[in-house]
Structures are given as structure tokens and as C-alpha cells.
Amino acid sequence: MSPQDPTPDPGAPAPAWTPEDSASLYGVDAWGQGYFGVNPQGRLTVNPTQDPARSIDLLEVVEGMRERGLNTPLLLRFSDLLHHRLREIRRAFDSAIEEAEYQGTYRCIYPIKVNQQRHVCEEISKLGGPLGFGLEAGSKPELLAVLGLTSGKPDMPIVCNGFKDEEFIETVILAAKLGRNITTVVEKPSELDMLVKYSRKYAVRPQIGIRVKLAARGAGMWEASGGVRSKFGLFVSEILQALDLLEREGMADCLTMLHCHIGSQVHDIHHLEAAANEIARVYCELRNMGAGLRSIDVGGGLGVDYDGSQTNWASSTNYRLEEYAAAVVGKIQAACDHAEVPHPDILSESGRAMVSYSSLLVCNVLGRSSFDAGMPLCELEQDAADEDTPPPLRELLEVRSELTRDKMRWAFHKAAAARDQAHSLFDLGYLSLTGRAACDEVYWHICSRLWELAKDEDEVPEDLQPLDSSLSDIYFCNFSLFQSLPDSWAIHQVFPVCPIHRLDEEPTRRGVLADITCDSDGQIGQFPDKRQNKVKSVLELHELNPDEPYYIGFFLVGAYQEILGDLHNLLGDTHAVHIRLDGDDDWEVGEVVRGDSVREVLQYVNFQPEILEEALRREIEKATRRNRLTVREGRALLHYYREGLEGYTYLEDAEPEVLPTDPETPDSSDQKPEPARA
Ligand SMILES: Cc1ncc(COP(=O)(O)O)c(C=O)c1O
């Protein structure tokens, strides 16, 4: 502070909370990569072109869709953002190629498995065409979709991965004869025999790729996709035999591509570099042996920094897109220059990096169950000195009276032991229900006081860290984790989450987010923590206002989430809406895909709604004859049933509700806090 600065007045009120404070708290700039921001009105904005001057107010969109009859949960896809991502990938590789004076070209291939929704694929095929991008299919249905998507686009490259049968290969060969730019990647030796057979049958010279089982492996959740134990690809010895076979058939020139894929979301660039180097070395040797190789496809793996920490951490990446492009180009170039082999064209199948940012989910909060850390302790009749006071309660009361800052850990463990003892005595019939309730109450009172003290420490003692989530609220959110964020449940993937409005108000509550499935796993308790560079178990949230909806956004959900989502509890697809910038710096609604109706989800599991409805109608008829229901009541029930069948599978128009709750018991022994990142 300079000498002229006024000395801060310790008694002065804290400065007002600002939208910038929220942006920093939720790490919006870090994970948002310029695509998301907070405006002066305290609302989350989407900047589809990374230009804050062309931002879209998310709350405005949600309210606008509500007026159009589309309630939350709502999936929003931003077409201009998707386009921007494609151009960014193109630009990164173009710069790397130009800077290195690399002689080959680059093409990005969208693996449709990442999100096969027709509107997404059509946009990529339309926007990606002029950028030289292509599509990848990994199964028979995907192949048929890709052939349809590339109709009339003979130059658009198609790469076929995955296991294939005769029908698959015959279709590919005929598509090549039709004039499609299609490469079949051999994943196991028998596929090569089929390729030779159908090429001969239809007199086609196919473009063949071979997936190499690299020794290099990825890192993280999809590590097993690479390495010699991966289920796909050929060992180098098998590749030599494959080349032999092709030479004998006079088809060595048809072996045009080498392919690898070491896994998705590779967070450490060293693994990607090692793979690029290894496949380039194999390429050079094969080329010198007479293969007609012209390109290397380095597969997927380009990661997304979900938590914004830029670290070597599963939900982050320790590299940027530009560094990835430079590493791939540089490694391939170095190996080829060393072997005096011309530079191949490079392909990557960077699906996650293409589509993650362009979709987000917004849901409304239905209510909260809260545990108030500061709640007053009920009047207890017993005191510690009283002989009738049960021993565990006596201990808890003593701990409470002796609790000071320098005895926090002692107090926590002593209180936990006394409460465990109270529960055992209750189970054995030696402690009454009121005695047990008193023990629980004093225990939680101690915990809240402990947390109040611990929060002010420079570092919260490790044993006490679980108290943070144990004493937090539960916010009930109108969505299904299993349908909309399956990776959060299945592989504990961290996604950025934050309220989309009221960001000019300080969030005074801390909570976890529970969905509406009847599954205790349907809960999010992991959030990016930019400020501490680790994952936090509770999210800062606002007090619920009775007459105002409270909306939470889940970001970067464009890759895999839509397609891996399932029908747990028959909660179906959410509404999906495409939002575009219009010429006047405003936004407009593009395609609207209505979410599943109850009728549809029932049909997915083979119910026939007409039969269900008829059965209910008959039962109502009988009940009215027996005077159990009036005709009017019967009609009302049938009306609700019919309306329900056509309705959304999610809850509609619920008012936020605040309920009291029991806090979750922290387990002081085995709940280890998330380690700080390297
Ligand atoms: C062969 C192949 N290519 C590309 C991808 C997409 O990878 P990413 O999501 O890392 O872009 C996958 C996905 O696992 C894959 O199996």
C-alpha cells in the first residue's frame, strides 16, 4: 500500500459483493476459456465467439424458452460456439504446420460417438466441410449415419474404426466405388482378409488404415485404450504380416494410413508426444518397406480443462490446444526428417475438444434441505454433573464446554467416539430415544462450532475437512445425473457448475446438488476449486427466494454426456434447443428438440400407454359404480393421467421449498480430502 492510501478501517463494512467476485469464486474465466463470463447484472453469459461484446445472457434464454413453453431442465447448444471451436482447432494446426514448415496437411475428423445427435452431426458436417474436416464411424449404425451425412460431399474424409463384419466391409467398399473418400482402419487381422476379398469382388482399390497397438499409453480414465493390452489394433509383428499380404495381393499402395488412439481426455502432454513419436517411427519404417502410406491419424485424446486448473489432473490438461498441435506436428516431423521420409498428412479425431464447450444444461432448484451450523442448541435438561445423565451425553457436554481453538482435533475425535458409543447403547437398548437425540444434538452442535473455528485457520486440519460437506445443505435440482451428466456418476468426472444468475449477490450457503432420481448416487459433491487448485466438495450457493426460481448451469457437457445418458427412473431426454447469434448481436432460437414425453419413455420399456390408460378407465368406472369416486373425481383422475402421459418426465412448476435436514455424519477415519494438485 502506498503512503497516500487510506488505512483500512477495521470496523468498516465489507465491500459489496460484485459479479467479478462470483466469476473468481466459480472459476468462470479459468474453465470458460473466454466462452463464458459474468455480466454487470450478475448473470452468466455465453460468448460464442469469445468476444464479450457478442455475449448471450443465459437467464434471458432460459426465461425466453419458458415463455415458449419449454421448462428446465433444458439443454442449450450454441451453434456459433461449436463453429468457433472447429475454427480454433483448424487455426492451431495451421499455425503449427506453418511455423514448423511442415510439408503435410491437417484434417480433423469428428468421431460421431462423442455426440451422435443428428443436429450436432449435421452442424459439424456443414461447418466442418469448408475447413476440410471429416467424420468417423465406430460401428455399423454410425457408418450408415455417416454415409448419409456425407451424401453429396465426396471429398469429405470418412474414417471407419471399430470392429467390422462382412456386411460393414462390403458397404465400405461399395461406398468407395460410389466415390466416397473413405478409409477403413483394420482393428484385427481378419478384417484385412475381408477387405482384400471385397476389393477384388468389386474391383475397387480401397484406402486401408491400420490401427497400431502402441507401447505408449495414455493416462487417466481411458488409459486402457492404448498400450499393448488394448483391445484394438495390431501388434507391429501383425502389421508386418499385413503388409506382406497386401504386397502379395498387389495392394501395398492401398495401405494409406496408420492410426492410433491412446485414450480420451489425456491430461499429460508427454503421453501424447510419446504416442505421436512412436506411430511416426512405425510409419517411416513401413513406408521405407514399400507401403503406400500417406497419412497418420493420431486419434482422439485432446483433453478439455474442465476444472480450469491447467494441471496434470484427470479433469484438466497440462497443455493448451496450440501446444497439442505443435507437439503432434513436431514429433511426426522430427521422426520423418530423421528417416528421410516425406511428411505425412495428419489427422486427429478430437471429438471432445470440438463439442464439449458448445452445450450446457440448466436446471431449476426445487428446494433445499439445510443444516444450520449456527442453530441454537435446544434446552437440555441434563447437565454433565448430573448422575442420571447417560455417560456418552456427559462426555459430549464436557467436550462442548472445553472446546477451544487449540483443542479442535481432540474435541472432534472425542465427540465422534461418544456419539458412536451413544448409538451402540441405543442399539442394545441401554439408551432411550430422547437420550440418543440429545447426544446427536450436542454432537452436531460441537461439529458446527468446530467448523466455525476451523474455517478461520490458515489450513483446515485434515481430520476436520469432511465437516465442510457434512454440515452443508442439499439443493434438490430438477434433473437426472444419470441422464444428463452420466460421467459425473460413472467416473467421477468433474464438470464446472454454477448459478446462472444472482452473481452480484454473495452466495451465503454451501451445498451439494442432488438430482430427482430415487438413487442416493444421484448427487454431485465435486466442484472445481480454482482458488485452491483442487476439487471442493461443496458449492457456494444463494439463499432460495420464495417467489423466484433459482437456476444452476452445468457446463462443458457437449461430449459424451448426451449419448451415454440413461433412463434411470424413466427420466428421459431433456429438451434441447439450438441458440444462434443473429446479425444484430442478439440471439435467436434455432432447432428445438422436445424432450421425451412420459408416453415415449414408457414405450421405450415396452409399455403400451393405451392399454395402461384403458385399464385405469375401467377401474375408475367400477369405482364410480361402487360410489368410491364421484364421476367428476373419476374424470379428473383420467384427465391427469392423460395429461401426464403427454407431459415432460421432469418436475414442472415446483416452487422452491426449504426443509430441515439431518447433516451427514462425517467419517473422521476414512474420508480423505482430495490431495492438492501437482
Ligand atoms: C478411436 C477413437 N477416436 C477418437 C475418439 C474420441 O476421442 P476424444 O474424445 O478424446 O476426442 C475415441 C473415443 O474414445 C476413439 O475411441
Image (cartoon, rainbow, N blue to C red):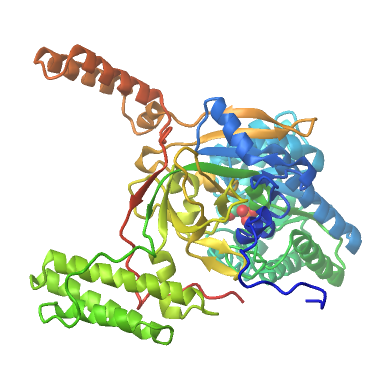
Where 205 falls versus 447 (above or below)? above
Quadrant of the snapshot with the C terminus: bottom right
Report whether 203 appears left or right of 362: right
**Residue at 17% across / 19% down in the picture?**
619
Total marks drawn?
0
Q: Return the x and y of residue 668 as percentages of the image width and height.
A: 35, 76
Q: Is residue 147 visible?
A: no
Report whether 192 appears left or right of 412: right
**Residue at 81% across / 55% down in the picture?**
93
Report whether 677 appears left or right of 390: right
Which of 285/87 is in front?
Answer: 87
**Residue at 69% across / 35% down in the picture?**
123
Among the 4 quarters of the image, the one containing residue 288: bottom right
Q: Is residue 279 visible?
A: yes
**Residue at 82% across / 78% down in the picture?**
3
Among the 4 quarters of the image, the one containing residue 63: top right
Which of 332/6 is in front?
Answer: 6
Q: Return the x and y of residue 336 as percentages of the image width and height.
A: 83, 67
Quadrant of the snapshot with the N terminus: bottom right
Which of 631/460 is in front?
Answer: 460
Where 187 falls versus 452 (above or below)? above
Q: Return the x and y of residue 406 as percentages of the image width and height.
A: 43, 87
Among the 4 quarters of the image, the one containing residue 479: top left
Q: Return the x and y of residue 57 as percentages of the image width and height.
A: 67, 40
